Image (cartoon, helix red, strand yellow):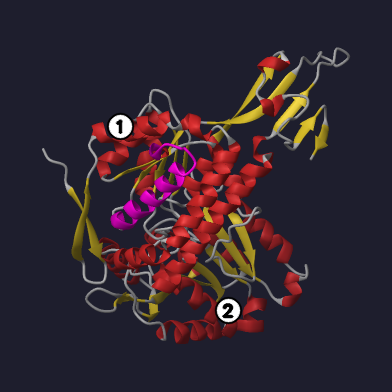
């Protein structure tokens, strides 16, 4: 049977634009993985890796107009948003190049023998080495930053791991263009083009995770798809690490004092966050706990005004649009759920933003209202009105793991008075990033960033954004009693590479 064609589709009309490729066969997946594996040696030199990453950023920038045009045609995210996302992606590539140059990610630790210790310490030298070929599963909602040249690819290449990317079906033409840019950047530094492989198709994604030469995987997508791949990674004859970002509700708790102090500003800020990118951000606030009294009414009024002024938008594809319409309709039909601004169809190909309200007590117990505690992808949020602190706490206790959790405090609470510290402690177990008086949409690419959280937000404790994302693709190795002449240069006493390290208990920079 011939492989199915891969089409570029215009989400604004739902019509096919052009045939981009065909779905990869098992043999083609095998060839891509083997080509990546054969390119491993070319990434051994850290200077080559850093130069490759910087050249990739330069060439992506040089192709900006073509790439943004292709991305907009396939995602409808708009040139302004996409130009910014491409800039973020190039910044991320350069940031990882800097990390490679610095070398601290190798975590070099050297202990000379010590016969006086109990028990005696032999000569031990520890550092981290790349795992091998990494399978990368692209996301739909970030066609640059979480796709072919995104954080998983950039951090894996920085670690010295070739990648094979499973392209997302929502932007196949863009994926081909970006992969071509990365390969030309690789060739400029003597790195084989196979260092970045690209395959299309659902079956190809399964064959990729099962390939014996794939040593780890990174995924951003749905709970259903991510869990299936996670289970497949664990069920292999040799299980591999699977770093998946699956889904997140991103709860927001607004204290009564905060609402009394600035209800209108909070309502407007919430509207901007939940509708940003047509609600297609993985950190969109999907559940908001707001007080039931007069200050909460003011907040809902402000939210109503702001969301009502939001123009309809196009989702990434029509399947997502159908799921959004079905999801909000099912939620709105629940007893005692109101729709101050009804989310739904904005036109034949668009959706309109909205939000639902429900008494928080309905969410405190398992049963009919559990659906409101599940992520609904698109421009909608649920505002649960709580009567007292105990009711809000009961809802929080039922939430699964999240990427983010946010609390809005009054000026006095933020200064450490009242329940401010207690609320921060209550939210910390729920998420990998806890915000105070802000909004979770927007994930800065910074050394201290953590984009991850307890399951089902992610399947590991690692981050997919920020410098420490490189740690996912490395494993520690210790050499014991190895003669100096046999050691890699990273572990020699004279430190010929000038690496930061811990040498006999002392940190050297």
Q: Position of residue 138 (x, y in %)?
A: 39, 50
Region of the chain picked out in magenta, as a range? 171-194
Front in this rendered view, residue 449 or 111? 111
Q: Indicate which disc, 2 or 1, sits on the residue closer to the N terminus.
A: 1
Q: Which mark is residue 31?
A: 1
Q: Position of residue 220 (x, y in %)?
A: 42, 50
Q: Position of residue 167 (x, y in %)?
A: 33, 49
Horizontal placement of 436 versus 459: left or right? Answer: right
Query: Cβ–Cβ below 8 Å for labels 2 and 1?
Result: no
Q: Would residue 152 be seen by someone viewing this image from the given angle?
A: yes
Residue at x 49% of width, y 67% of height: 84
Which quadrant of the structure image shows residue 264?
bottom right
Q: Which mark is residue 289?
A: none
Residue at x 38% of width, y 72% of height: 78
| Residue linked to disc 2 | 266
Q: Would residue 465 be seen by someone viewing this image from the given angle?
A: no
Q: Is residue 257 above or below residue 21?
A: below
Residue at x 41% of width, y 74% of height: 356
> Crowding near pointer 1: few (<14 within 10 Å), some, many (20+)?
some
Q: Is residue 380 above or below residue 455?
A: below
Image quarter (top left, top right, bottom left or bottom right) of the C terminus: top right
Q: Nearer the viewer, mark 2 or mark 1?
A: 1
By secondary structure, the bulk of the magenta-drawn segment is best described as: helix
Which quadrant of the structure image shows residue 129?
top right
> Crowding near pointer 2: few (<14 within 10 Å), some, many (20+)?
many
Q: Position of residue 302 (x, y in %)?
A: 51, 85
Q: Is residue 501 above or below residue 273?
A: above
Under tag 2, what secondary structure?
helix
Q: CA distance from mark 2 to mark 1?
A: 53 Å
């Amino acid at each position: 049977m011939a492989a199915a064609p891969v089409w570029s589709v215009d989400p604004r009309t739902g019509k096919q634009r052009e045939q981009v490729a065909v779905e990869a066969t098992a043999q083609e997946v095998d060839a891509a993985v083997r080509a990546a594996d054969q390119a491993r040696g070319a990434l051994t030199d850290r200077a080559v890796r850093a130069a490759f990453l910087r050249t990739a950023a330069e060439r992506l920038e040089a192709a900006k107009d073509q790439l943004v045009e292709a991305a907009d045609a396939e995602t409808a995210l708009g040139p302004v948003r996409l130009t910014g996302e491409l800039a973020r992606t190039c910044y991320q590539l350069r940031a990882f190049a800097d990390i490679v140059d610095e070398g601290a990610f190798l975590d070099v630790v050297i202990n000379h023998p010590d016969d006086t210790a109990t028990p005696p310490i032999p000569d031990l030298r520890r550092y981290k080495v790349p795992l091998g070929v990494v399978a990368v599963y692209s996301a739909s909602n970030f066609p640059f930053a979480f796709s072919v040249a995104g954080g998983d690819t950039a951090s894996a290449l920085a670690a010295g791991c070739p990648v094979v990317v499973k392209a997302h079906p929502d932007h196949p033409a863009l994926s081909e263009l970006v992969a071509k840019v990365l390969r030309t950047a690789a060739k400029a530094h003597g790195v084989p083009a196979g260092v970045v492989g690209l395959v299309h198709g659902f079956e190809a994604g399964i064959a990729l995770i099962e390939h014996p030469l794939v040593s780890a995987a990174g995924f951003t997508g749905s709970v259903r798809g991510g869990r299936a791949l996670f289970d497949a990674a664990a069920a292999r004859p040799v299980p591999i690490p699977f770093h998946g970002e699956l889904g997140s509700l991103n709860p927001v708790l607004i204290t009564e004092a905060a609402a009394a102090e600035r209800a209108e500003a909070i309502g407007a800020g919430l509207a901007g966050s939940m509708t940003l990118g047509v609600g297609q951000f993985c950190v969109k606030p999907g559940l908001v706990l707001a007080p039931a009294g007069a200050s909460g009414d003011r907040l809902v009024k402000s939210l109503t005004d702001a969301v009502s002024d939001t123009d309809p938008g196009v989702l990434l594809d029509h399947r997502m649009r159908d799921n959004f319409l079905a999801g909000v309709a099912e939620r709105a039909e629940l007893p005692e759920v109101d729709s101050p601004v009804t989310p739904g169809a904005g036109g034949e190909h668009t959706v309109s933003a909205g939000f639902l309200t429900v008494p928080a007590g309905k969410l405190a117990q398992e049963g009919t209202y559990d659906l409101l505690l599940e992520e609904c992808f698109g421009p909608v949020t649920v505002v649960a009105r709580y009567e007292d602190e105990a009711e809000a706490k009961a809802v929080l206790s039922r939430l699964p793991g999240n990427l983010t959790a946010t609390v809005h405090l009054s000026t006095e609470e933020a200064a450490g008075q009242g329940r401010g510290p207690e609320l921060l402690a209550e939210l910390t177990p729920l998420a990998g990033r806890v915000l105070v008086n802000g909004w979770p949409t927007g994930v800065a690419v910074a050394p201290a960033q953590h984009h991850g959280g307890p399951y089902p937000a992610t399947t590991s404790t690692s981050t997919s954004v920020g410098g420490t994302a490189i740690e996912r693709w490395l494993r520690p190795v210790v050499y014991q009693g190895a003669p100096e002449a046999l050691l890699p240069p990273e572990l020699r006493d004279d430190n010929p590479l000038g690496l930061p390290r811990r040498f006999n208990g002392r940190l050297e920079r």
